[in-house]
Amino acid sequence: MNIRSNWSTDEILEILESPLMELLYRAQTVHREYHEDNTVQLASLLSIKTGACTEDCKYCPQASRHAKATGLKREPLMDVDDVVMKARRAKEAGASRFCMGAAWREVKDGEDFDKVIRMVKGVRAMGMEACVTLGMLNQDQADRLADAGLTAYNHNLDTSPEFYGDIISTRTYQDRLDTLGRVRNAGITVCSGGIIGMGESLWDRARLLEVLSTLDPHPESVPINALVPVEGTPLGNRKLIDPIELVRMVATARIVMPKTRVRLSAGRAMLNREAQILALMAGANSIFYGEKLLTTDNNDTEEDKQLIEDAGMKVAEAGCSEAGCSSCS
């Protein structure tokens, strides 16, 4: 199978809407061709700075304008030593990637960013992949992160360009694409995905995957999130999606981006074991691992290990597993 970067929305929508058994078979065939090791990467995610974000993302409890309604408490940037200690514990529990999230609109030079640089160096020094999500950044900041050894930068597109304005107004879709371009220019691998269940159409979901799959090269990592409605946010009253919708999104992402690590992310805690195994079968080969995903509850770690074993898969060892990572090659 040739790896394409010229998928159309209509082509992807046809895949997304195909009969489930056919979709799963096609996705599993692609997955076996490009991921013979049959591994699942465990990634641990830590909120290193919580709340007080100036963005207005309708799904996010960390937006300052939602804080009164959600009751989320603001927490300042953590100490470097505390973050490195948590990374060490995550590694001991089996995680090979440590992701650090700060609720910032954009990176600002100064003491806090210097601390993040030291966090990245500390995580890399113990042999783990290091990923951060810090909002928008300029090229000099991206280069500094690359020099520190950063493996990946997460910056989600969230949804289609057409539906994006219904969810966020404080930064543009192009702002997000520009940040991804700077990350790529710095030689850092790209982690970018989206959220389903926010009121978007199936066409919007296909369009999101089109934007991601027409990036050349494809993002090395694509998180597929299902909305976790948080009371007090504008999307707090939305119904949970049918788990099969998440499985379909994973399978379609696997087909159009064969080499990418497709990450089963937020919303996984609402899936039963069977639905999670179906998502692994559909091509997910990474899960976020640990009790929290920033501010959202996540699955039990021992249950996750048992799930992977029961699915006949293996936990990926520490060390960069993403092609093209200049920090890890």
Image: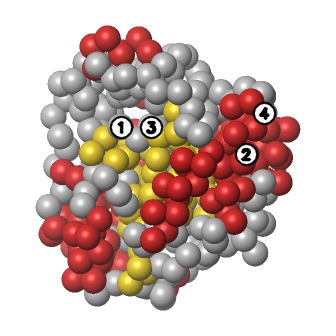
Say which of 316 and 124 sits in front: 124
Lower position in the chain sequence, tag 2 or tag 3: 2
Residue 68 - label: none
Lower position in the chain sequence, tag 3 or tag 4: 4
Gap in Å between the C-alphas at discs 3 and 4? 23 Å
Amino acid type, label 1: Thr
Q: Nearer the viewer, mark 1 or mark 3?
A: 1
- Coordinates of residue 329 in the picture (x, y in percent): 75, 75
Q: Is residue 324 left or right of residue 227?
A: right
Check disc 1 and report its element: helix, strand or loop.
Answer: loop
What residue do we see at 34% from left, 48% from top? Answer: 292
In the rendered view, would you say 22 is above or below 130? Answer: below
Check disc 4 and report its element: helix, strand or loop.
Answer: loop
Sort mark 4 into few (<14), some (14-19) or many (20+) by Cα contacts within 10 Å.
Answer: some
Q: Say whether marks 1 and 2 touch (CB < 8 Å).
A: no
Check disc 2 and report its element: helix, strand or loop.
Answer: helix
Q: Say whether marks 2 and 4 touch (CB < 8 Å).
A: no
- Coordinates of residue 67 in the picture (x, y in percent): 36, 16
Q: Is residue 140 left or right of residue 108?
A: right
Q: Say whether marks 4 and 1 touch (CB < 8 Å).
A: no
Gap in Å between the C-alphas at discs 2 and 3? 29 Å
What residue do we see at 62% from left, 45% from top? Answer: 80
Amino acid type, label 4: Asn
Lower position in the chain sequence, tag 1 or tag 2: 2
In the rendered view, would you say 17 is above or below 105? Answer: below
Amino acid type, label 3: Thr
Amino acid type, label 2: Ile
Disc 1 target residue: 295
Disc 3 target residue: 159
Residue 138 - label: 4
